Image: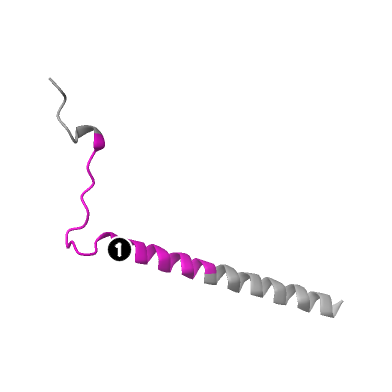
């Protein structure tokens, strides 16, 4: 029974480590995406509303 308990504890620890590494990877990707949106423009990108882009036709 001791080997099985040791196996379960080790398995649970490895699963926790894998989850932590995945979370770190997601955080890195999110930070990288935020940096890319403002690249080349110090004030960032301006989002326009598509409906107010053009004046209505007369």
Residue extending farthest to the left is 58
On the rendered image, what quadrant is the N terminus found in? bottom right
Q: Which residues are magenta?
A: 22-50
Q: Residue furthest front?
A: 57
Image side of residue 30 versus residue 16, left or right: left
Q: Quadrant of residue 4?
A: bottom right
Measuring from the top left, give residue 30's x and y in whole percent: 39, 62
Q: Nearer the viewer, residue 9 or 23?
A: 23
Residue at 23%, 46% (x, y): give it.
Answer: 47
Q: Residues within 10 Å of mark 1 (few under 14, many from 20)?
A: few
Mark 1 residue element: helix
| Rendering coords of residue 33 (x, y %) | 35, 62
User: Image quarter for residue 58?
Assistant: top left
Does 33 sit above or below residue 7?
above
Where 21 falls versus 38 (above or below)?
A: below
Q: Is residue 18 left or right of residue 47?
A: right
Image coordinates for residue 44, horizontal then vertical, percent: 21, 57
Task: Read off the residue under disc 1.
Answer: 36
Q: Quadrant of residue 14?
A: bottom right
Q: Is residue 25 magenta?
A: yes
Left or right of 16 on screen, residue 36? left
Where residue 49 appears, x then y in whole percent?
24, 38
């Amino acid at each position: 029974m001791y080997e099985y308990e040791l196996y379960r504890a080790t398995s649970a620890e490895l699963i926790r480590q894998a989850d932590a590494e995945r979370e770190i990877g997601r955080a890195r990707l999110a930070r990288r995406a935020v940096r890319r949106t403002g690249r080349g423009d110090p004030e960032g990108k301006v989002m326009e509303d598509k409906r107010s882009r053009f004046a209505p036709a007369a």
